Amino acid sequence: MNDKVVLSEGKTDIILFRWHLGTTQPVKISERENRCEVTWPDAKLTLKADAPILVTQVRLPDNTLEGHIGSKNTDNHHICIGIQTRERRTTLMLDTEVRPRR
């Protein structure tokens, strides 16, 4: 998947993406300036950007499926990764590849 972000009128900001991984287990994050691999037992996510990125993980409520209200059920919290530029930018190109590990 290829994403291109262009902020309006030449504005600069930290550009942020979030991926909800659907796993309850912490993931392994391997970063190198413009590239990152995120792995967990089910899959591997590879990210390549045209600028330095920072990738973090946090447990968040999952409200993505019908009938799921993560804020009311702590069993419905999963790992989410945040991908953000290390500096303020006007644009970002991000290539994402997800592959199953089974």
Image (cartoon, rainbow, N blue to C red):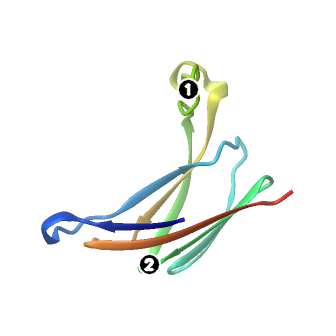
Total of numbered circles in the picture?
2
Q: Residue at 52% across / 64% down in the picture?
A: 55
Q: Residue furthest right?
A: 102
Q: Residue at 41% across / 73% down in the picture?
A: 93
Can residue 87 be seen here? The reply is no
Residue 35 vertical placement versus 43 (above, below): below
Residue at image mark 2? 52
Kind of residue indicated by mark 2: Pro
- In what element is the residue under mark 1? helix
Looking at this view, is 97 or 80 the one in front? Answer: 97
Location of residue 67 (image quadrant): top right
Answer few, some or many: residues within 10 Å of disc 1's Cα (few below 14, many 20 plus, some between 14 and 19).
some
Answer few, some or many: residues within 10 Å of disc 2's Cα (few below 14, many 20 plus, some between 14 and 19).
some
Mark closest to the chain's N terminus, 2 or 1: 2
Q: Where's the C terminus, which quadrant?
A: bottom right
Q: Where's the N terminus, which quadrant?
A: bottom right
Can residue 18 be seen here? The reply is yes
Residue at image mark 1? 70
**7 horizontally vs 70: left or right:** left
Looking at this view, is 72 or 93 the one in front? Answer: 93
Q: Residue at 56% across / 77% down in the picture?
A: 35
Mark 2 → mark 1, Cα distance in angstroms: 32 Å
Image position, residue 44 (x, y; %): 72, 63
